[in-house]
Image: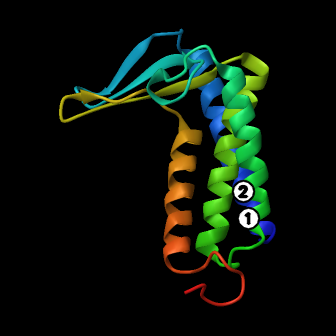
Amino acid sequence: MNKKTYVIAIFILLFDQISKSLIEIYFKLNESFVIVKDFFNITVAHNTGGAWSILNNHSYLFIIFSVIALIVLIRFMFQFKNNLRNNIAFACTVAGIMSNLADRLFLGYVRDFLDFTILGYDYPIFNIADIAIVVGVLLLIVAILKGEDKKYGNSK
């Protein structure tokens, strides 16, 4: 990967941390502000588990998983073909994991605030880092399907 990967990752990490901090400055815990009625709210939540509060109050497990995931990602980052999509994929994934890991290490929970209801289903509240992780993983899946998980040529 190249310098752009690191710049993108730092930008995402800072954007997530700043957005979380601003939300906590202007809103109280569990406060909800309607942006688009019956679709999108800003709702402040502290999550000590994973998505859907899975393994709630087990932050230490997510700290361990995050560190392992970062080690694996950094190892594989240099094996993938060096192109813009893959650089963005690794930047998003690493930055998202690092930002949520920082929350867990320094606060004991992840700060979430994006609250969507789609087709009557109220999705778990999430944050920018979560979006970055999902986008990054999807882009990595595309890279693997295209055979770009080997630096030199197709793996097919």
Q: From this viewpoint, is residue 130 visible?
A: yes
CA neighbours of label 2 inside 10 A, class few (<14), some (14 to 19), many (20+) = some
Left or right relative to 136: residue 83? right
Which label is found at residue 35? none
- Of 22 and 86, nearer the camera is 86
Instruction: Residue type at mark 1: give it.
Output: Phe
Which residue corresponds to the image point at 78% horizontal and 21% vertical from the top-left? 106
Which label is found at residue 73? 2
Q: Quadrant of residue 148?
A: bottom right
Q: What element carries label 1?
A: helix
Which residue corresponds to the image point at 60% horizontal and 84% vertical from the top-left? 155
34 up-or-down from 129: above or below: above
**What quarter of the picture does the N terminus occupy?**
bottom right
- Residue linked to disc 1: 76
Instruction: Residue type at mark 2: give it.
Output: Leu
Which residue corresponds to the image point at 70% horizontal and 38% vertical from the top-left? 66
Q: Quadrant of residue 156?
A: bottom right
**Whole-percent x and y of residue 118?**
24, 36
**Whole-percent x and y of residue 3?**
81, 68
145 up-or-down from 16: above or below: below
156 up-or-down from 17: above or below: below
Between the C-alphas of marks 2 and 1, the distance is 5 Å
- Label pair 2/1, CB-CB below 8 angstroms: yes
Q: How many labels does the image show?
A: 2
Q: From this viewpoint, is residue 14 visible?
A: no
Q: Is mark 2 on a helix, strand or loop?
A: helix
**Whole-percent x and y of residue 91?**
68, 58
